[in-house]
Amino acid sequence: MKIGIYPGSFDPITLGHLDIIIRASKLVDELVIGVLNNPAKKTVFNEAERVQLVERVLKEYKLGSNIKVEAFNGLSVDFANKKNASFIVRGLRAVTDFDYELQLAQTNHKMKPDIDTIFFTTRLEYSYLSSSTVREIASFGGDIKLFVPECIVQSVYDKYKAIRSV
Ligand code: ADP
């Protein structure tokens, strides 16, 4: 059985992530979306919230059958090992992603030669899209409907409303 992991912060999940999830899930028998909990990286949505948002999107798009979501911390290769995965899925948006992603893939391959990284190039319409762009727009009350799945739009706005009221 071919298992792949798709690690990331998903803070929050975007249409770009969703596109990669759908395409990667056709290539492997099982795709585990790994929601990274990195104590050094402060996220707007906590670990449980990020997992819930991904789960809601999978349900909404009826993508349940061979896709799972799980939070993890530590190295992606260790998470992949734990999940018996042979592949790490990553998305490449633009050349600006390339240096970092290449270095990461080669380091991971050095640590665990049995695990390969598969890159999906972004669909053109999402090549500019990142979670940080979504966060910035949402923080100013801008329209994020074009960037994240409809079913999570309100939760993103609610989060910023809660942040502003603190
Ligand atoms: P971000 O870089 O948006 O904060 P993550 O850390 O969650 O996102 O990224 C997880 C993976 O998803 C990375 O490989 C990243 O390149 C990829 N990714 C993020 N946004 C997109 C997008 N719009 N299209 C394709 N891949 C993407």
Image: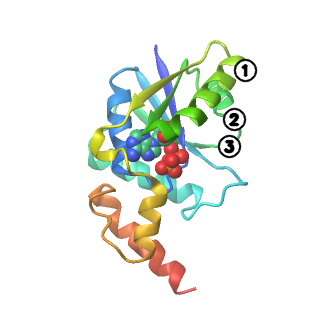
Residue 73: mark: 3
Tell whether 74 sits left or right of 127: right
Q: Nearer the viewer, residue 128 or 47?
A: 128
Q: Are marks 2 and 3 in contact (CB under 8 Å)?
A: no
Q: Nearer the viewer, residue 59 or 119?
A: 119
* Label located before the other in sequence (1 or 3): 3
Tell whether 161 sits left or right of 61: right
Q: Where's residue 54, x and y in %?
A: 42, 49
Could you classify mark 3 by the number of other residues whose Cα lies within 10 Å: few (under 14), some (14-19), or many (20 or more)? Answer: few
| Residue 78, quarter of picture | top right
Q: Where's residue 53, x and y in %?
A: 43, 55
Residue 111: mark: 1
Front of the two marks 1 and 3: 1
Residue found 50% across the figure and 80% down from its top: 162
* Label located before the other in sequence (1 or 2): 2
The residue indicated by pointer 2 is 75
Name the amino acid type tagged 1: Met
Residue found 52% across the figure and 87% down from its top: 165
Task: Report the Cα–Cα distance between label 1 and label 2.
Answer: 10 Å
